[in-house]
Amino acid sequence: MREKKPTLIVTFDTTTAAMALEKFCMERRLPGRLIPVPREITAGCGLAWKAPPEDRKTLADAWTQAGLIWSDMRILLL
Amino acid sequence: MIQVNAIGDTCPIPVVKTKQAIQALGGAGVVQTLVDNEIAVQNLTKMAQQKGYGVTAQKLEERKFQVTMTVGENAANLHAEQETLCQPRPASGAEKTVVVIAAATMGAGDDALGKTLMKGFLYALGQQDRLPETILLYNGGAVLACEGSVSLEDLQSMEARGVEILTCGTCLNFYGLTEKLKVGGITNMYTIVEKMTQADRTIQP
């Protein structure tokens, strides 16, 4: 069983919002990656942005400035 | 006689413990092994037969079986040992088949042809004697489970006959089709991965 560690998870209301954010992050080499939304958050479906917890402010600032939308941001043990 | 208690042990431990006991005999003798499931009885019996030991098995009570092996003076390792099967191979009629529909078209080349081929595939799939356990639809395939799909009736018919039909929710959301799903349920990537990896075979047209 792999070790769990604190992880920043950002969720979205729509797939397209998640994909737009991913494109933005990749162009600017921002930390993190897109994953299927963890089961710990929902039994449903969707995409989530996963990043190290320490990058929370960097990401939130960059996304706010760019006018990008996200739904929820939290730290989980994953 | 050596007695081996393998109650609660998972495969292949009962066979391993029994082999160790037989070695400890240092020659002729009897080893009696207690197990709690039929598969272990089968594995032990097969092992004994391969090695030329006498073997009998008895059910003592629910989830308690006794396998008695008699090692003779001249018991020889007659056959190369076959692998112990920790899970029974399903009879071919019981194989879990998962069909993966990853696009609205079948094959690459002409899209109109591809749509026609996919329609034909889903129709023919429904005509088989043995239906798949699950059909997974994602990306371009997700539209086939929605209102207006030419394959809707075929999918609904298979669902009515027990086939589990699951469409990727992320994909439905992307295409704006979430409210238009007309057959089966919505699933996520983790379930899709589980269904595929736990299938005996996956078929992707």
Image: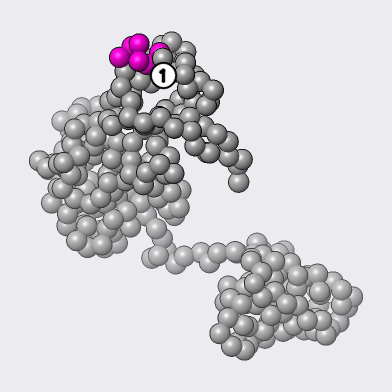
| Residue occupying image coordinates x 75% and y 70% | B17
**Location of residue B169 (image quadrant):** top left
Q: Chain of mark 1?
A: A
Which residue is the site of mark 1?
A60
Q: Is residue A37 left or right of residue B205?
A: right
Q: Is residue B203 left or right of residue B86?
A: left
User: Considering depth in this image, is A42 or B192 the residue closer to the camera?
Assistant: A42
Residue A60, percent across and down?
Answer: 41, 19
| A66 part of magenta stretch | yes
**How many neighbours does mark 1 have within 10 angstroms: few (below 14), some (14-19), or many (20 or more)?**
some
Write the residue at 57% across / 77% down: B38
Q: Nearer the viewer, residue B138 or B128?
A: B138
- The magenta stretch is A62-67
Task: Name the one closer to the observer, B173 or A63.
Answer: A63
- Quarter of the image with the N terminus of chain B is bottom right
Q: Residue at 60% of width from left, 42% of height from top?
A: A2
Q: Is residue B184 above or below residue A75?
A: below
